[in-house]
Image (spheres, rainbow, N blue to C red):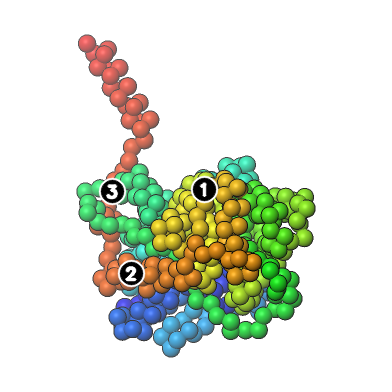
Amino acid sequence: MRILLVGNGPLPDENTPKRYAAGLRTWQLFSALQNDKAAGQSANHQIHLVTIAEPNAYDDTDSPDPTAQPPEISQITPDCNRYNFHKKDRRLKSKLQKLINTQKPDVIIAANNHPSYLVSKLKFKVPFWADLNGWLPAEVQAQAYRMQSDAFIPHFHKMQDTILRRADKFSTVSTPQQHAITGQLASIARLNSKTFGYQFIHSIPNSPYPQTKTQSPNIETLGAIPQGGKAFNLFWLGGYNTWVDQETLFHGVDAAMKRHPNLYYISTGGGLTGLDSSTYETFKQLVNKSPHKDRYIFLGWVHSADIPHIYSKVHAGLNIDLPCDETTMGARNRLNEMLSFSLPVITTLGSEISYQIQEHHAGLTIPQRDSNALASAITTLIDSHQLAPTPTPTPIPPTQPLDFIKAHCLPEITTAPLLHWLQNPALAPDHNYKIRLKSPLNTLAKIAKYLKVKHFSK
């Protein structure tokens, strides 16, 4: 069976300045397919991968140097090619269509919303699985809140509507998002007589990429992190997205710094170009007014190869979310990754994984919008740490974070619904079956006209 997977780049094994959640999600699905094939479960599968690169993915500029990117066509294994395209390539759609026409896949899988949208607009007649990595309406709402503009909401709603009308199967990053997509399918009449009993949607939680210290670290980057003595380093990983609660994050950390003179805040990442820079800028402004500002260390965007080395220098990870629909529906890659490094974490409750962390005692959880609770949780971890004068029993068993990942988040576990479907992929029961929905306003107008005619005919 010929499988075409269309996703995003860069992949997490590429040593790039920025790591995108979309690239990680593409790796998650692709690695599951490759591992399943290697294990002999699907030995006859021929897998080809398409990665669509963000404009600044490989050299952190808007007009990337083509030499900094992978070649347009490369070979991963003897029977697996990788096709690397650029998101702003005007011929992207035609290139994808040509690839489908020449490769003639038996099934198409799209990882992430934008690739799913592109595939939905192409011509093909084979089963199509659309992976909706994040619920677009909630993500766009959070962006609109930050920008104080709703101008781009119709565009993204159109994107998701196009996907929902075309795909045969869907995957989400959480159970709440699965329920939201069910409601959207109902609103366009895909819950009908043909699809009764058919499971359109499966939840595929995120999986962490298994990083190791394969390259020498950037000495300048690691040198900026306080070492030795009684230093306790908090860690923020990645971008400050639209759903980050920067005020609670700052006030909680700063209050803890007042109590603990050896506490430091280590941050990678920063603002997100073209999406949200205000959250990061606001956080930096708060930091600059703090009497402890010298203990906030901002490393910026670092290369992927440096990340494992940074983990060996920090003591606890943070994830602080706003109370919003994106938090409820979404996933948190930073939590998955921190737990995979056995790093103790503190997270606000709200996302599905935060409640799982609470249930399995894999980290400390706190209420949203509660900086005092954050400061107290930080103190709890410091007091239980070996650097403390009189360590108290740790609230997080040392092996618990990694045990949670191994039990719930490995790719072969999370992608089980997709792998099962690929044993016998099929079009949705309502393929080529459309129900024309009448506008409620038009219907009411016709009823009013009918009643008026009936009234005057008496």
Q: Name the residue under label 1.
A: 367
Residue 44 in the figure: left or right of residue 285 = left
Kind of residue at disc 1: Pro
| Quadrant showing the C terminus | top left
Say the numbered circle drawn on residue 191.
3
The residue depicted at 28 percent of the width and 48 percent of the height is 191
In terms of secondary structure, where does tag 1 sit?
loop
Kind of residue at disc 3: Leu
**Nearer to me, 427 or 237:** 237
Q: Mark 2 points at which residue?
A: 416
| Count of labels in the image | 3
Residue 355: horizontal and vertical position, in percent?
43, 55
The 10 Å Cα crowd at callout 1, few under 14, some 14 to 19, many 20 or more, is: some
The nearer-to-camera label among 3 and 2 is 2
Instruction: Determine the residue located farthest toward the bottom in the rendered image.
Output: 78
Relative to residue 184, is residue 309 depicted above or below? below
Relative to residue 319, is residue 406 depicted above or below? below
| Quadrant showing the N terminus | bottom left
Q: How far apart are marks 2 and 1 (CA)?
A: 32 Å
Mark 1 or mark 3, earlier in chain: 3
The residue depicted at 77 percent of the width and 50 percent of the height is 289
Kind of residue at disc 2: Ala
Whether residue 118 is visible, yes or no, is no
Relative to residue 20, is residue 286 depicted above or below? above
Residue 398 in the figure: left or right of residue 241 = left
Circles 2 and 1, Cβ within 8 Å, touching? The answer is no
Residue 436: horizontal and vertical position, in percent?
31, 43
Mark 3 or mark 2, earlier in chain: 3
